[in-house]
């Protein structure tokens, strides 16, 4: 009997799962067809989780790092409090889910996103200083007629709209920030967007440091094998 029972039980279990009403009619504790009786999804799958608060953005890489609060005070004597304040600013930026509010987020008691970006763009504009020039004023869309940091308002405003743009009227796609550059007066026919092969961080810092050339991606695969490095999740071996 034990051998017979061991063979028959799996068969009965199969029938109970596959036959629906005929089997369940004799099983009063079973839930109706297609439900698990416990508030989950059909076929016993768990219910879909509820989305929580937004914790990050999927926009242009490096913007929060480069422009919201890059010059925070990391003095060891008060680093814990200063780091907490710095991270609070970055969280304010990341957690705003409504694009209509992005430009006006109060990152500090006095600075909106655009105002903070203007200040830090002014700092980055001096990075290409040479022996004969201070490097200022050659940043993309710099407005020499504006007062104070507002000379950097055009670029700050475009960057504050932290989305990836693709111009589908163009068939050439080779430049990160191509659409943004075109909108700011650097005429080009690139579709923009962000391909996995783009060296986006280098482009971001090249643009904010100044210069008039079209942003160049100039990426080389980390391991020297683009065929594998560019596969999902697009991570090559570290250098």
Image: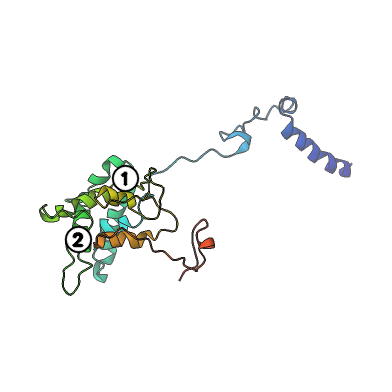
Q: Residue at x 29, y 46 (%)?
A: 161
Among the two numbered marks 1 and 2 on one chain, the one whose residue lies closer to the N terminus: 1
Report the front residue among 39 and 204.
Answer: 204
Q: Which of 165 and 232 is in front in this view?
A: 165
Horizontal and vertical percent position of residue 164: 36, 48
* Residue that mark 1 sits on: 96
185 with respect to 167 (left or right): left
Residue under the image location 24 percent in, 70 percent down: 77
Residue 171 image position (x, y, % from top left): 41, 47
Q: Which residue is found at the position 39% from the left and 43% from the top?
A: 168
The reply, left or right, for residue 236 in relation to residue 70 is right
Q: How far apart are marks 1 and 2 (CA)?
A: 31 Å
Mark 1, other Cα within 10 Å: few <14 / some 14–19 / many ≥20: some
Say if 158 sits above or below 207 in the image.
Answer: above
For residue 29, above or below residue 93: above
Residue that carries the numbered disc 2 in the rendered image:
138
Total marks placed: 2
């Amino acid at each position: 009997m034990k051998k017979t029972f061991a063979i028959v039980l799996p068969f009965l279990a199969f029938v109970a799962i596959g036959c629906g009403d005929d089997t369940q009619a004799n099983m009063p504790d079973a839930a109706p067809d297609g439900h698990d009786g416990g508030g989950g999804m059909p076929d016993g799958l768990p219910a879909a989780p509820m989305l929580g608060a937004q914790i990050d953005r999927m926009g242009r890489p490096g913007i929060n790092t480069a422009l919201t609060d890059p010059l925070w005070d990391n003095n060891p004597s008060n680093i814990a409090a200063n780091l907490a304040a710095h991270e609070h600013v970055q969280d304010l930026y990341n957690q705003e889910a409504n694009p209509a509010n992005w430009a006006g987020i109060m990152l500090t008691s006095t600075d909106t996103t655009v105002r903070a970006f203007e200040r830090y763009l002014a700092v980055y504009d001096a990075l290409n200083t040479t022996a004969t020039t201070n490097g200022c004023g050659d940043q993309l869309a710099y407005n020499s007629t504006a007062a104070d940091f507002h000379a950097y308002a055009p670029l700050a405003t475009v960057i504050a709209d932290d989305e990836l743009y693709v111009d589908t009227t163009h068939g050439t796609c080779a430049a990160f920030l191509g659409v943004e550059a075109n909108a700011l007066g650097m005429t080009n026919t690139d579709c923009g967007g962000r391909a996995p092969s783009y060296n986006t961080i280098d482009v971001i810092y090249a643009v904010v440091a100044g210069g008039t050339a079209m942003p160049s991606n100039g990426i080389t695969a980390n391991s020297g094998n683009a065929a594998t490095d560019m596969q999902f999740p697009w991570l090559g071996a570290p250098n």
